[in-house]
Image (spheres, grey):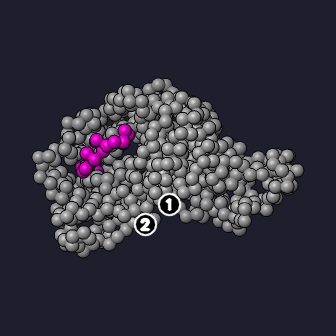
Amino acid sequence: MTIARVALDVPLACLFEYAAPGLTREHVGKRVLVPFGKKQMVGMVMEIANQPSISPQRIKPVSFAFQDIPALSSQTLALCRFCSDYYHFPLGQVVMTALPSRLRRNKPVTQKMGWVQETLRSALNQSQATRAPELNAEQSKVLRPIRMGEFACWLLFGITGSGKTEIYVSLISQVLKLGKQALLLVPEINLSPQLEELLRGRFPQYRVVCLHSGLNDGERLKNWLLAQSGEAQIILGTRLAVFVPAPNLALIIVDEEHDASFKQQEGLRYSARDVAIFRAKQANVPVILGSATPSLESYHHALSGRYHIAALTQRAAENAEPPSLRYIDIRRAKLNEGLSEPLIAALRERLQRSEQSLIFINRRGYAPVLICGMCAWISGCSRCSSRLVLHLLDKKLRCHHCGHEERVPVACPSCGNVDLIPLGQGTQRVENALSDLFPSARILRIDRDSTRRKAIWPEMLKSIRERRVDILVGTQILSKGHDFPKLSLVGILNADTSLYSTDFRASERLFAQLIQVAGRAGRAQIPGEVLIQTQFPGHPLFEALRSHDYSGFAKTLLAERKHAGLPPFMHQALLRAEATRSSTVMNFLADAAKLASRINHEVTVYDPVPAHMPRLAGRERGQLLVQSNSRKKLQAFLKDWYPKLAETANKKVRWALDVDPLEF
């Protein structure tokens, strides 16, 4: 009796057995349609066996075996198994997460394959390749020791503007000459258009495909199939692209490896950077982690010798220097809608010189909160432990956490006062203030609100490069990866918000963000200047920033982390839970802590506590932290603990295990 062991998209860790008389081992990695309860579900064949492990009377037959696409390779299935084991997430849900949504449906895609075959047959762009700039001595030195065909993890630690992208392109060129495939991961969708344009220009005779959530289902499936067939030699994508099948994979690059966007925060809570390293080792290929501000985990591994380090210490453009930094003490400065006089004067000077400026404020909307000066009413979200942000252009109060919206009230809901006050600055308010100060300036606001339309971001980039913009106002979308040759001034507002956060990673993130956004200035021949408005100009973080000393600052943080027993010297897992009532959440976590105390694997189990945001989207949230100085011991503990949690969980509680959490 032939048995197919199938992974299904259900919250159960086991494989399900079905009678499959027509299937062979060649069908491992193929999709099948199987009965599950009262419905039919798409599953993935993980194993073929000769004997069932349960009573034959309980086994139902496979309804249909899909033959529309090639089977997933054993390497791809092994990658899914690794993620299931390490992140303690059901294997079937891992496999389905790795597939394009079209392949999760219970219909074959054969009838939709015409455009794929046409793409395979279509002629490639035969235009002349754009000329690559000559590498400087430092870039050439970095390239020499990186070898294709053997696993090594390289931390490419280069200051902003040092030419890390040219290193990527040179390595990809080596891969293409070998007839192989390269995978390049970026943290944000907004970074992919300019990289795609660069790669298509340099390698017009090769196929470049993109994989990210901005594509529709058909585009994503087409590009996924081109990668799986080996027809696409360069694969560019965000975190989910780490799972894309690539039979000839020879190189993996993770750009801006420190970025928190590489960590999935829902469902399968994986780190694309860490999965990329595992995949590179599995395929025996090099993996490059690039950043001007590496994560402390990666930097620690480089210092300890686990990773190789390749450093770029100078800017790639001839005579280009890192920007000068100056702090504006806003305790003594008079502010005009959040802008100090020295910053306004610097903006005016750049306008007179026809140079571009960037005002960075990591808050979208008009103002973070609306208040009543009479009774102290605050525009709070009814569904979250957060404030509603004023979006004046839309005349809405909007929660940036759950998406809840309300109309701006004409009077205070508490006392009836009509004089409501917007408190603080967001990108819209800064844009309005700049328009009043410089009415002839061409100002462009770039944030999540202004870039929602699919095609708008490339249009904005084109406007900036063609110098049809004088002043940019933006959030973290603009903080990394962009090269604007005429941008000479960066002004940073509200830099103090993370200095004294309870999150132990806050200072690391702030330093990285400020280094990244400061690096947008002076990348070509024009000298760059960065003005940072702050109430704490003498803070050690700002002192390190002034000297562009990431290494010194990172070593200080590592010493603090080691003394406090925090990552990367400790390994953590966070049990997250939510329910409609706080008592339900805390009772579940208390029971989970008791279960944990009965398992002896030398881990520390902390008391249950409310989440940093206790209420989100109408549900109460709590968490339970466990940690160990040994990853192996923590994983052994989680392997025992997870099934016990699944057995005893209250149906009223949603819970998830977050291994190597970044947010608390």
**Residue at image point 47% right, 43% down:** 624
**Residue at image point 76% right, 46% down:** 47
Question: Does residue 473 show up?
Answer: yes
Residue pointed to by mark 1? 214
Q: In this orientation, which residue lies closer to the viewer: 636 or 221?
A: 636
Which residue in the rendered view is the most extreme toward the right? 1
Q: Earlier in the sequence, mark 1 or mark 2?
A: 1
Mark 1, Cα crowd under 10 Å, few <14 / some 14-19 / many 20+, is few
Taking the magenta stretch, the answer to whether it contains residue 503 is yes
Mark 2: secondary structure:
loop
Q: Against 223, is 47 above or below?
A: above
Q: For the residue marked with disc 1, what is the amino acid?
A: Gly
Image location (x, y in percent) of residue 40: 72, 64
Q: For the residue marked with disc 2, what is the amino acid?
A: Arg
Image location (x, y in percent) of residue 190: 43, 55
- Residue 552 position by quadrant: top left
* Magenta region, residue range: 486-505
Q: Is residue 661 left or right of residue 521?
A: right
Image location (x, y in percent) of residue 599: 58, 34
Image location (x, y in percent) of residue 333: 12, 49
Taking the magenta stretch, the answer to whether it contains residue 194 is no
Q: Against 199, is 394 above or below?
A: below
Mark 1: secondary structure:
loop
Q: Against 603, is 317 above or below?
A: below
Residue pointed to by mark 2? 453
Measure the alpha-carbon separation of dots 1 and 2. Answer: 10 Å
**Residue at image point 55% right, 37% down:** 596
Question: Does residue 135 show up?
Answer: no
Mark 2, Cα crowd under 10 Å, few <14 / some 14-19 / many 20+, is few
